[in-house]
Image (cartoon, rainbow, N blue to C red):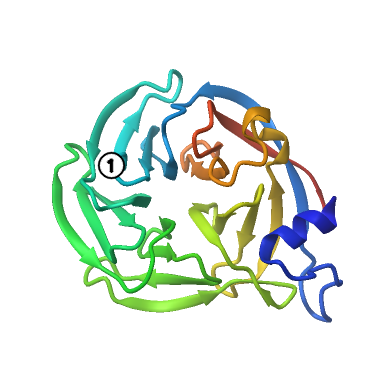
Amino acid sequence: MVSRLLLALSGLALLAAPAAGQTPVSRATAEIVATYPHDTSAFTQGLFIQDGILFESTGQVGASGLRRVTLETGHVERQTALEPPYFGEGSVQLGSRIYMLTWQSETGFIFDAGTFERIGTFDYEGQGWGLTHDGTHLILSDGTAELRVIDPADFSTVRTIEVTLAGRPVRRLNELEWVDGEIWANVWQSPLIVRIDPESGAVTGLVDLTDLVPSTLAGSRDAVANGIAWNRETGQIYVTGKLWPSLYEIRVAGATD
């Protein structure tokens, strides 16, 4: 089981023990604490909680947008759409602004967090996948093993983080979330979340979401696990997937080295 999961991360044989001096990688399963409804038409690309409120960004041309959602019911309280040809991706709130990426347009959008009014745009090179922040800077994933730390004032790249597991790059990093001093990332087309040290880029832990994947969607190329939200006030962690019928509060259980 562990071998299959590790291979899914990057297509490399990452089964060797860590090199001398490297920190062992913990492996854990996601234990469901609570289950909530989720819109099965939502191609989830970004998920975050701000001041106890759930926000979600969605993808697909013609169906992309930003929404504020009632956690308990899945009801969409407020939403705004991205017009074609934009394909929505990750999103995050920093201060009074919500930042949202697009996939291949090299354009990001800035929204007023209260009204969802579009108040600006920003540019970046390459693709946009996931987005989070460390309290000061935005952190962007683009499908590679490199994360970009971005100054929200001028959108310049402050530094990059090379994400590695056992010294090897971990690619296909997708939705991002800052969780209590770590960066958590879904790995596209994998049921895994990697826990990343934001200073070194080393993967320090894996969270396996296999048991949460809906049986009707198992094996789907598109309806994969994607979406991580951490409530900074309570410590609660929520996850979902593209087109999934449920959103879960989880507890990370059974960690082993």
- Asked whether residue 221 appears in the rendered view, the answer is yes
Above-or-below relation of 163 to 216: below
Name the residue nearer the viewer: 119 or 135.
Answer: 119
User: Residue 93's x, y, as percent?
Assistant: 32, 49
List x then y, in percent, for residue 243: 49, 34
Q: Picture coordinates of residue 254 (x, y %)?
A: 81, 43
Q: Nearer the viewer, residue 239 or 52?
A: 239
- Is residue 203 shown left or right of residue 113? right
At 31% from the left edge and 39% from the top edge, which residue is drawn? 63
Residue at numbered disc 1: 62
Residue 172 vs 71, above or below: the answer is below
Asked if residue 6 is positioned above or below residue 74 in the image, the reply reads: below
In the depicted structure, whether residue 110 falls above or below residue 204:
above
Residue 41 figure quarter: top left
Element under disc 1:
loop
Horizontal placement of 187 versus 130: left or right?
right
Kind of residue sitting beneath label 1: Gly
Percent from the top left, x then y, of residue 168? 69, 76
Q: Is residue 257 visible in the rendered structure shown here?
A: no
Q: Quadrant of the C terminus?
A: bottom right
